[in-house]
Image (cartoon, rainbow, N blue to C red):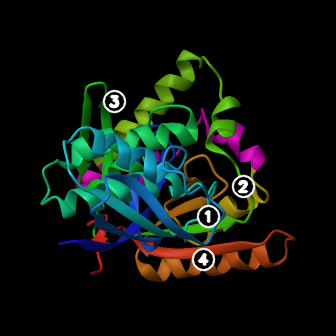
């Protein structure tokens, strides 16, 4: 192939108790990217539609990742990248990760897949770290592997793909305000109490077990974050009422998607997801904050080749 068009999915990171290590992939929201081979050496970003982002590949997240991959090879040609940006930057649903991972996924396809998904995460980390000022793969991993993923380690990089129940749906409420990942990280505590740490890793272990055993009740009881959510929720308008409403409509659990401001709720079945989305929609309509809502099954494929 000389050109490829892909769907670059949005993702939910942290998933409550899994700060910086757990994430899952969404199916109904994402960017569209086209990458084409060029006779000119190097990486170029030729067009971005949707948001005002830099075309210079050295300061564009997709470009930084692509350059990391490109420089690892000795090629006598280059690549041009076009981005239809549909995931709002600073939304908390993996906007930067979609760009960072999308460019390297597409180039890898055009090169007949010399790199594994884990190796692609390494390249994509270079772009993602520019956005958040730290290396974390909890958005990148589910985009590239699909489904639920656990980042066991960054150095050395080790990513585990997790099973999950078939009828698991996600509802996303995205208040149209921007929270930069770097800013959201700056308000987090440098140390936590032993009591909170024990609760957090108990919840994470229980959530992983619930995913493996399709125990929806255990999944719901484990979606509790006692470290990050209490601080970041203060930045999100209507957060507490949106969470309470989701739980009253049958959601398994609700928490902050990534660094916010998006809020996710996991639900058993599409009917419950629709009820949660409808109730949360009514709350947001009454507020003065513009918003979007999404309902999505878990996307087990990750990136999708469109043409």
Mark 2–mark 1 Cα distance, whole angstroms, equals 9 Å
Q: Which residue is mark 2?
A: 178
Q: Specify few, some or many for label 3: CA neighbours under 10 Å numbering under 14, 14-19, or 20 or more.
A: some
Could you tell me if residue 269 is visible in this image?
A: yes
Task: State the residue at coordinates (65%, 29%).
Answer: 188
Q: CA distance from mark 1 to mark 3?
A: 26 Å
Which residue is label 1 attached to? 88
Mark 1, mark 4: which one is toward the viewer? 1
- Mark in front: 4 vs 3: 3
Disc 2 to disc 1: CB gap under 8 Å = yes
- In the image, the segment drawn in magenta is 210-235
Q: Secondary structure at mark 1?
A: loop
Q: Quadrant of the C terminus?
A: bottom left
Residue denoted by label 4: 277
Residue 304, numbered label: none
Which badge, 2 or 3, comes first in the chain's sequence?
3
In front: 38, or 301?
Answer: 38
* Gap in angstroms between the C-alphas marked 2 and 3: 27 Å
- Residue at image point 68% right, 30% down: 186
Q: Nearer the viewer, residue 244 or 158?
A: 158
Earlier-in-chain disc, 4 versus 2: 2
The disc at residue 154 is 3
Q: At which x and y percent is residue 47?
A: 52, 69
Q: Earlier in the sequence, mark 4 or mark 3?
A: 3
Q: Taking 210 as reference, is 258 left or right?
A: right
User: Does residue 85 appear in this view?
Assistant: no
């Amino acid at each position: 192939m000389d050109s490829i068009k892909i769907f670059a999915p949005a993702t939910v990171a942290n998933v409550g108790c899994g700060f910086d290590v757990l994430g899952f992939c969404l199916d109904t929201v994402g960017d569209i990217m086209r990458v084409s081979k060029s006779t000119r050496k190097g990486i170029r970003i030729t067009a971005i539609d949707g948001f005002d982002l830099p075309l210079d590949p050295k300061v564009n997240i997709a470009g930084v990742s692509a350059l990391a991959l490109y420089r690892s090879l000795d090629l006598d040609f280059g690549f041009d990248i076009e981005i239809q940006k549909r995931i709002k930057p600073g939304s908390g649903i993996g906007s930067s990760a979609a760009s960072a991972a999308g460019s390297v996924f597409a180039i890898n396809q055009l090169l007949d897949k010399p790199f594994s998904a884990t190796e692609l995460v390494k390249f994509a980390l270079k772009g993602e770290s520019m956005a958040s000022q730290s290396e974390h793969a909890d958005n990148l991993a589910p985009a590239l592997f699909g489904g639920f993923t656990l980042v066991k380690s960054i150095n050395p990089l080790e990513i585990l793909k997790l099973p999950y129940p078939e009828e698991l749906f996600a509802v996303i409420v995205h208040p149209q305000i921007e929270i930069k990942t770097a800013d959201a990280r700056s308000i987090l505590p440098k140390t936590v109490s032993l009591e909170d740490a024990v609760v957090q890793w108990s919840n994470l272990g229980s959530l992983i077990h619930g995913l493996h055993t399709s125990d929806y009740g255990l999944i719901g009881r484990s979606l509790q974050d006692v470290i990050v959510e209490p601080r970041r929720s203060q930045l999100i308008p209507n957060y507490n009422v949106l969470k309470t409403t989701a739980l009253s409509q049958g959601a398994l659990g609700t928490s902050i998607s990534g660094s916010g401001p998006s809020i996710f709720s996991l639900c058993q079945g599409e009917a419950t997801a629709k009820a949660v989305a409808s109730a949360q929609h009514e709350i947001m309509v009454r507020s003065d904050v513009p918003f979007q809502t999404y309902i999505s099954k878990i996307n087990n494929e990750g990136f999708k080749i469109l043409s």
